[in-house]
Image: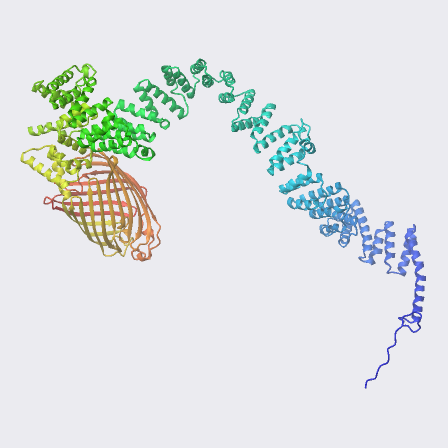
């Protein structure tokens, strides 16, 4: 069992307890006490000795004691420091350094060494002991390199010494230690900052200043520190960082206005305008009263605040600032600076304008202008016055200008205008009177102003004075002329305008002057001068656009009056473009009435009835009535009747249109419609004289003889001197059975017709009028002999023949000199038809002439003449309609064949012409007309016949050669429709294997197409198949038609067609092409132009490129008979672009075996011009009754090839009669090589 331990003994800590625990025994403690007592006994005397050594003045004794003590106690640092100090005091610096040597780098020893070496360094430099100075400098550098300043003064002294020693590395190490001594007193902080600034430690200098702010006790000291910090930071070139740091410190301080101004500038330098405004608010109370604010700001501060407020867009604040600076007469500091008050006044004016107060701004500028005239004040007053339309501002401006002197005429004029606008015309007159001696050109303005004031005589006198001095400009001359016109002095006004003819001026004024002169001549009834004046307006490009519509209309009226309707019609299209309006459209129709032309009317409709004006005219009854007159003049009475119906519908109350409608119905003998119209309009027309005339004629036509007699009785007083009306009245009396009275009326008409011409025509000795001759011819039977009647007819023919030649049918113009007697008689009958034609062209609204035409012509005669008119004008629809009505029965066979051909019946025309030729041959007749008809008939037979062609051709295109037969067949399906077939099979070969190789052996081509023609319109379509290096299916569409003015147009579209531009394209390519051509012939001259656009691809469909071609020719026929000769100028421009990729599928045709590029296929572009000569080109490739040569030679100058020649010669002629054999050779050079062809062809015509 374990043994139990006894209770543990408790430890006692009581000092009275003898048994307590102790650290040291009592004996040990006693020994330690004795040792301490001995030490104190020994050390105390030594301490007293050290105090004695430090305080004694006997340096030598002190040094001896210290040296003795050091020998006894060699490791005592204090003794060595005392010894070194004693040596220093007596100037023994080397002994001092030696005494310190054993102490090493001990700080106190280093401090003494530093003192010693500084003294040595300064002394050596003073004695110019370079070696010692360098030794001292090295020692100082080592000491300072390991020194650490204990306070600010040591730090400052150390840095200054290091600067002197030129130890930058040590300086950089010690410079940051300045922060350890902060916060420094303000003066010390500023010194430290200056020292650091000199060292280039800008940021550190600012930190020292910022860290010393707590030590600054006054606001001025704080401000000085921050301002210096700002300058230091600005020296770094980072204004933004400088502002940020200084502003951050400033915000911690109480507001300081003086500091705030500095911060304003610093914020601006940092481009913090918003912050600058914040500090500006602390710097000055910008919202205070103007007087307080103005006195609180210095000139520089006011300038700075102004710029800030403007930059912020605070116009109200800027205006308040300007008011503050200007408050009081020059009392604020900013305004007291010489010249600054005016600057601030100008600024105030600018801000007022920018603030939307231009009126106040102008008043400010006006005040400145009153103080002193400057260019800026003048400019701004004028600008604002103009913008505000302020007469007072303008007056102030011009008054200042007048004081300034040197005003021009325009300036005086504007001065006067401003006064007038302000309501001071008398002052304006005075100003102009003041200016006219130096500027006589102002007489016009003075006169105009006097005229407005009602001082007419003074105004005219001023104008006259200006005219006398030749000082009136164009505007003033026009005003003078208008003033004279108002007084009735027309001739004087005209003279003024004449004198100003050479005056310069804008086109508007020149047009006004010329137009006023023309209008004045028009009003004076002087047609020739008026036309000359209007023509001057019209023919001057700059003036035409300023002609007024009524002036254009008058120009056309005068042209028609003096030069005839043809001249007017030539001008009317351009006149319409210049001034489209209703009156001009009606004037155009009036000219067409006098010079009827279907094409002219169609042009009128295309030109006038389009656009907005045309839309309005299509709803105007007057236009339809006027166009009806043109239809009547053309003999197109159906169209005239339709237009009159439309006119009456649009204007049911227009009596003139109703009268015209009735006359037309009378002329067309539309009895039923005439009856309805008569019943509808008679009640309205009885009260009008012209209405009674048409009603009388209508009643007569409708068989209501009593009513016609009643109306004629009412018309007799006004018509009893009109012989034609009397003759009509006599016919009416005979219808009523009153032959006796009819005879009396005829006798009265005869007496009037037999009176001298002056009583009827108005001119003594004048020849009888055509109406007179016709009326006398009608009344002559029973009153004159037969011989006299024949003389009358001969007179009538003689009067009509010169005018009838243009309207007579073709057979009537051929002349009877070579015809038999019966043919001459037929021509005489045709002259009678020309008389009837003239009668149809009479104004049928005149009742007497209407009656005369009805009395002389039968309905068949009128139809025959109308047919011939339609033939002459090329109106195919009218020809067809009249032929259907039987109008061709009264024509001879030749004219009837011409009519059938024009109407689109070629087979009937051909048969009729054949019969006429056979009859003429049987009778032995021959004439130029018959010969021309025979030639025309033969050509027509050939055009209608079927045709077979066999041709052997040898064709070379570059290096590709084709040889073989070509078969063609043309079959006439109908007179208008033909079927054309073609097939060829030719041998292909290469003429130069270095250019192209690997060609297939054969070229196969087949085509089928249709051609249709109807007069001037021709259409064609063909589809084919071609095989060479691949197969294609060419499609071609053709169209040929006639444009206005005889221009022939052709269009062609090709799709997948054979491309013969190069040999490679010929065998391996295809093209899509659109071609347009225009040609025009005028007499012997002709011209043509053709434009085409093409796209090229391989026969596999891969794109190769594109091309564009423009060709033009112009020539003249030197002879048009056989042989024909021509000379021409020609040129072309071909542009091609090869854009496709290489074609591996066609590598076989490339001599190198490589995939040919697109340029292998596509030719190079070229431009060429030249001259050509041709003979027998009119007969080439057409049937000829004998052998004849034909050819063409072109001499060209090519941009790429230089001089080249194109040759095309051949020979053709019949073999058995209805056939033709021809030999043809063609050669030309292009950019890809030679193109040459010769062929032998046989063609046979057969069929109808």
Residue nearest the viewer, comparing 340 with 176: 340
* Residue 1187 visible in the current orientation: no
Residue 530, placed above or below residue 1205: above
Q: Quadrant of the C terminus?
A: top left
Residue nearest the viewer, comparing 413 with 81: 413
- Residue 880 percent location from the top left of the image: 17, 37
Residue nearest the viewer, comparing 1022 with 696: 696
Q: Quadrant of the N terminus?
A: bottom right
Which quarter of the picture shows residue 677? top left
* Residue 207 visible in the current orientation: yes
- Residue 567 percent location from the top left of the image: 27, 26
- Residue 832 percent location from the top left of the image: 12, 27
Residue sitting farthest toward the bottom:
1
Label count reads 0
Which quarter of the picture shows residue 910? top left
- Residue 673 percent location from the top left of the image: 20, 32
Q: Say whether residue 1042 is left or right of residue 516.
A: left
Residue nearest the viewer, comparing 1138 with 533: 533
How is the rendered protein coloured?
A: rainbow
Which quarter of the picture shows residue 1143? bottom left
């Amino acid at each position: 069992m374990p043994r139990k331990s006894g209770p543990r003994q408790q430890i006692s800590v009581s000092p009275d307890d003898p048994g307590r625990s102790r650290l040291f025994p009592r004996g040990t403690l006693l020994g330690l006490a004795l040792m301490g007592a001995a030490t104190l006994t020994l050390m105390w005397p030594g301490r007293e000795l050290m105090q004695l050594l430090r305080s004694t003045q006997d340096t030598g004794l002190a040094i001896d004691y210290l040296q003795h003590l050091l020998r006894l106690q060699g490791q005592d640092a204090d003794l060595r420091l005392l010894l070194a100090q004693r040596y220093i005091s007596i100037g023994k610096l080397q002994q001092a350094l030696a005494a310190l040597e054993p102490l090493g780098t001990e700080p106190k020893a280093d401090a003494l060494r530093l003192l010693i070496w500084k003294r040595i360094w300064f002394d050596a430099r003073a004695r110019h002991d370079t070696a010692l100075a360098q030794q001292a400098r090295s020692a100082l550098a080592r000491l300072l390199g390991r020194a650490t300043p204990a306070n600010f003064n040591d730090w400052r002294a150390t840095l200054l010494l290091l600067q002197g020693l030129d130890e930058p590395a040590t300086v950089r190490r010690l410079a940051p230690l300045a922060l350890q001594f902060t916060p420094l007193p303000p003066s010390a902080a500023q010194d430290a900052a200056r020292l650091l600034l000199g060292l280039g430690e800008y940021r550190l200098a600012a930190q020292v200043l910022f860290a010393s702010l707590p030590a600054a006790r006054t606001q001025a000291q704080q401000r000085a520190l921050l301002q210096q910090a700002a300058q230091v930071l600005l020296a770094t070139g980072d204004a933004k960082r400088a502002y940020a740091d200084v502003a951050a410190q400033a915000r911690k301080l109480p507001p300081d206005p003086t500091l705030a101004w500095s911060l304003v500038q610093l914020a601006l330098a940092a481009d913090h305008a918003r912050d600058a405004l914040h500090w500006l608010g602390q710097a000055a109370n910008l919202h205070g009263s103007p007087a307080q604010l103005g006195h609180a700001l210095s000139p520089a501060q006011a300038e700075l605040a102004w710029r800030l407020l403007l930059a912020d867009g605070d116009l109200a604040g800027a205006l308040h600032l300007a008011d503050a600076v200007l408050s009081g007469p020059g009392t604020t500091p900013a305004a007291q600076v010489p010249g600054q008050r005016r600057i601030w006044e100008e600024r105030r004016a600018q801000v007022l304008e920018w603030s939307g107060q231009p009126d106040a701004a102008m008043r400010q500028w006006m005040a400145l202008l009153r103080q002193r005239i400057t260019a800026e004040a003048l400019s701004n007053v004028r600008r604002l016055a103009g913008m505000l339309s302020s007469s007072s501002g303008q007056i102030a401006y011009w008054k200042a200008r007048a004081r300034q002197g040197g005003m021009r005429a325009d300036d005086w004029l504007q001065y006067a205008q401003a006064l007038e606008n302000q309501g001071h015309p008398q002052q304006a007159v005075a100003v102009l009177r003041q200016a006219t001696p130096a500027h006589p050109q102002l007489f016009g303005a003075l006169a105009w102003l006097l005229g407005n004031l009602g001082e007419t005589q003074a105004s005219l006198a001023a104008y006259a004075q200006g005219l006398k001095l030749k000082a009136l400009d164009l505007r003033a001359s026009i005003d003078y002329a208008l003033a004279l016109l108002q007084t009735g002095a027309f001739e004087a006004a005209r003279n003024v305008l004449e004198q100003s003819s050479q005056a310069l001026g804008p086109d508007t004024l020149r047009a006004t002057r010329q137009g006023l002169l023309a209008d004045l001549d028009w009003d004076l009834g002087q047609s020739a001068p008026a036309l000359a004046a209007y023509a001057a307006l019209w023919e001057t490009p700059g003036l035409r656009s300023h002609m007024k519509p009524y002036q254009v209309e008058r120009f056309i009226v005068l042209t028609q009056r003096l030069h005839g309707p043809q001249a007017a019609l030539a001008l009317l299209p351009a006149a319409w473009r210049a001034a489209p309006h209703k009156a001009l459209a009606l004037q155009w129709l009036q000219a067409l009435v006098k010079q009827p032309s279907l094409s002219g009317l169609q042009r009128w409709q295309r030109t006038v009835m389009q656009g907005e004006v045309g839309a309005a005219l299509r709803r105007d009854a007057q236009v339809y009535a006027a166009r009806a007159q043109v239809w009547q003049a053309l003999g197109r009475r159906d169209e005239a009747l339709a237009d009159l119906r439309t006119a009456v519908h649009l204007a049911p109350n227009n009596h003139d249109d109703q009268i015209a409608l009735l006359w037309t119905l009378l002329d067309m003998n539309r009895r039923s419609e005439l009856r309805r119209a008569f019943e509808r309009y008679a009640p309205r027309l009885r009260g009008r004289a012209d209405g009674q005339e048409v009603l009388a004629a209508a009643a007569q036509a409708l068989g209501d003889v009593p009513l016609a007699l009643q109306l004629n009785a009412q018309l007799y007083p006004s018509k009893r001197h009109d012989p034609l009306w009397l003759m009509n009245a006599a016919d009416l009396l005979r219808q009523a059975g009153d032959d006796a009275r009819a005879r009396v009326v005829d006798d009265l008409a005869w007496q009037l017709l037999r009176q001298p011409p002056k009583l009827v025509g108005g001119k003594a000795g004048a020849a009888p009028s055509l109406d007179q001759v016709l009326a006398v011819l009608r009344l002559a039977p029973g009153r004159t002999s037969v011989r006299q009647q024949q003389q009358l007819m001969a007179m009538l023919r003689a009067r009509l023949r010169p005018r009838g030649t243009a309207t007579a049918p073709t057979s009537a113009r051929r002349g009877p000199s070579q015809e038999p007697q019966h043919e001459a008689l037929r021509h005489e009958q045709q002259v009678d038809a020309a008389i009837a034609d003239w009668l149809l062209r009479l104004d049928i609204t005149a009742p007497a002439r209407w009656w005369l035409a009805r009395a002389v012509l039968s309905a068949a005669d009128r139809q025959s003449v109308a047919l011939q008119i339609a033939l002459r004008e090329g109106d195919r629809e009218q020809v067809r309609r009249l032929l259907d009505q039987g109008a061709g029965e009264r024509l001879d066979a030749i004219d009837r064949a011409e009519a059938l051909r024009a109407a689109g019946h070629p087979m009937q025309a051909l048969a009729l012409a054949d019969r006429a030729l056979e009859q003429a041959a049987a009778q032995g007749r021959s004439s130029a007309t018959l010969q021309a008809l025979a030639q025309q008939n033969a050509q027509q037979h050939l055009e209608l016949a079927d045709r077979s062609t066999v041709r052997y051709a040898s064709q070379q295109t570059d290096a590709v050669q084709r040889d073989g037969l070509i078969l063609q067949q043309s079959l006439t399906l109908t007179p208008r429709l033909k079927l054309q077939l073609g097939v060829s099979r030719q041998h292909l070969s290469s003429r130069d294997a270095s250019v192209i190789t690997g060609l297939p052996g054969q070229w196969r081509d087949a085509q089928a197409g249709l051609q249709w023609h109807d007069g001037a319109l021709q259409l064609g379509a063909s589809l084919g198949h071609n095989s060479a290096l691949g197969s294609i299916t060419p499609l071609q569409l053709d169209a040929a038609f006639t444009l206005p003015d005889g221009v022939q147009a052709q269009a062609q579209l090709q799709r997948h067609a054979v491309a013969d531009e190069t040999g490679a394209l010929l065998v391996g390519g295809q093209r899509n092409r659109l071609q347009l051509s225009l040609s025009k012939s005028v007499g012997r001259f002709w011209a043509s132009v053709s434009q085409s656009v093409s796209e090229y691809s391989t026969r596999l469909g891969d794109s190769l490129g594109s091309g564009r071609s423009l060709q033009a020719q112009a020539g003249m026929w030197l002879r048009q008979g056989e042989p024909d000769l021509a000379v021409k100028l020609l040129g072309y421009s071909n542009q091609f672009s090869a854009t496709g990729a290489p074609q591996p599928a066609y590598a076989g045709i490339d001599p190198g075996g490589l995939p040919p590029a697109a340029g292998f296929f596509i030719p190079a572009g070229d431009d060429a011009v030249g001259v050509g000569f041709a003979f027998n080109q009119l007969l080439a490739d057409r049937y000829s009754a004998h052998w004849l040569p034909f050819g063409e030679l072109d001499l060209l100058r090519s941009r790429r090839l230089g001089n080249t020649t194109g040759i095309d010669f051949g020979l053709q002629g019949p073999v058995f009669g209805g056939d033709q054999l021809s030999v043809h050779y063609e050669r030309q050079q292009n950019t890809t090589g030679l193109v040459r062809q010769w062929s032998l062809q046989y063609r046979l015509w057969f069929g109808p």
